Image (cartoon, rainbow, N blue to C red):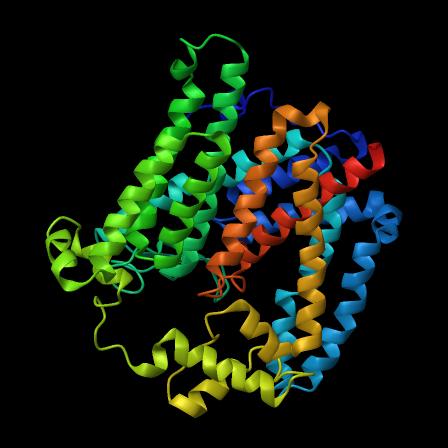
Amino acid sequence: MPNFLSLMPGANWQHPNPQLQSAWKSTLIGFAVFPLVPSMGVLFILFAIFKTWQHCGREIVRQRLNWGFAILAPWLIVVSLWGIQPGDAALGLVNFLPFFALFAAYSTLIRSPEQLRQLAWMMMIPALPIALLGFLQLLGYGATVPIWGTPGYIFQMYPHGNPLGRMSAVFGHANPLAAYLQMVFMFTLGLFIDSYEQNTAKGDRGLKWKSPTLWWLASVLIICSLSLILTSSRAAWFGAVLSSLVFTIYQGWYWIVGIVTTIGTVVLSAAYAPVPLKEPLRSIVPRYFWARITDEMYPDRPQALTRMSQWKFAWNLTQARPVTGWGLQSFGSLYQEYSHFWLGYPHNLLLMLSSNLGIPATIVLCSLVGWVLAQSLLLFLNFPLQWRSERTIFFTYLVAFGGFIIFNITDVTALELRLNTYAWLILASMCGLVYRARSTS
């Protein structure tokens, strides 16, 4: 395995503030192991959060955005007490309150574009062993690695995937793995374009394609793409294709846009075109794709397991309790009572939030996140000249967070520990640069 730090253009482990050096090193190590072994990675991440709060507590408190999260936190606790199952709702707060503190810490710790580049590499590295385990899994390999002396486990992998035939690797289910791989795909694509730009800027056009960094990133993209296909996640397929189009338009590579658009049109036509047209296309496009897109791969799916049924029920719950909601983690028991099927969430993040927490809390949370995205977009459009060489990396973070939101429109992977952590980390990273740009303007 290559020395990843040597592949990063101009990368180093140094933090602009020497007092936060240990926190930054702990962050990079933590996220390099976190997706593969969460119980180990979380220790490094918690240490980084603690050290940042210890050295920058006053600065964190001064940020008004953090006041918004601080005000929202007790409201979430109150509405949880009004839930139909206060105990479960209180446990559900773990998916929110600790991440407000994580956001506050990392939006202070991350203050330079070079940190974004290093962090993107660290988030990509564990995807390789995870993908390898996923390929072995589909061949029938399964394993549970327990945490010594406890009923917990370091990771668990089901033979032949979960659901059967769909790669899930160490994520327990195919959908969280697909969301993770989609995120890694976007970061890898962004790093590839960033490295391409770095090589082009050196002026030697003949040697840029001989760069080991570009070849390595291209290999990761191929592995990640194959793994994404084997998760059989329509949302992840759509996210990967859409992000590819976004990046190629950003670079002005319109001939690639044409190729991707043509392939996408052929596949969608094989799925949804009128019979005279789609039949010959279905002889070309593998059934694995068009049958999954149209859901013909699972023709006997009960109506209660369809997205529309879940969304309609969640919206009815929201209308019944628009202010306080029904409490965190309430959807599963309510939907089971209604449909006799157990589903832990309604496969839509906004509907989950509104039915669990009520409309006011959902609006406040979305407004706080939306403010960061709006300010990040403005920063991207008016990127400082001294950071111009890192503009693509910042754009990658915008695309990755956008992909996460789009994925959670048809699923809810935000409750998975690793994906939830990544989402808040990406948001905090962009916010940190917004803070830095404001302080230097």
Whether residue 141 is visible to the viewer of this picture, yes or no, is no
**Residue that appears at 51% across and 54% down:** 404
Q: In this view, does 24 lie above or below 58?
A: above
Whether residue 93 is visible to the viewer of this picture, yes or no, is yes
Q: How many labels does the image show?
A: 0
Viewer-closest of 306 and 274? 274
**Quarter of the image containing the C terminus?**
top right
Q: Is residue 195 above or below residue 401?
A: above
x, y percentage for residue 151?
47, 67
**Residue that appears at 57% across and 50% down:** 422
x, y percentage for residue 347?
46, 70
Q: Is residue 123 above or below residue 339?
A: above
Viewer-closest of 229 and 51? 229
**Quarter of the image containing the N terminus?**
top left
Left or right side of 158 for 28? right
Left or right side of 59 for 373? left
x, y percentage for residue 205?
44, 10
**Residue that appears at 53% across and 45% down:** 399
Determine which quarter of the picture holds residue 279.
Answer: bottom left
Left or right side of 165 for 337? right
x, y percentage for residue 226?
30, 43
Q: In this view, does 25 lie above or below 351?
A: above
Viewer-closest of 418 and 76? 76
Viewer-closest of 218 and 418? 218
**Residue that appears at 40% across and 8% down:** 206
Determine which quarter of the picture holds residue 88.
Answer: bottom right
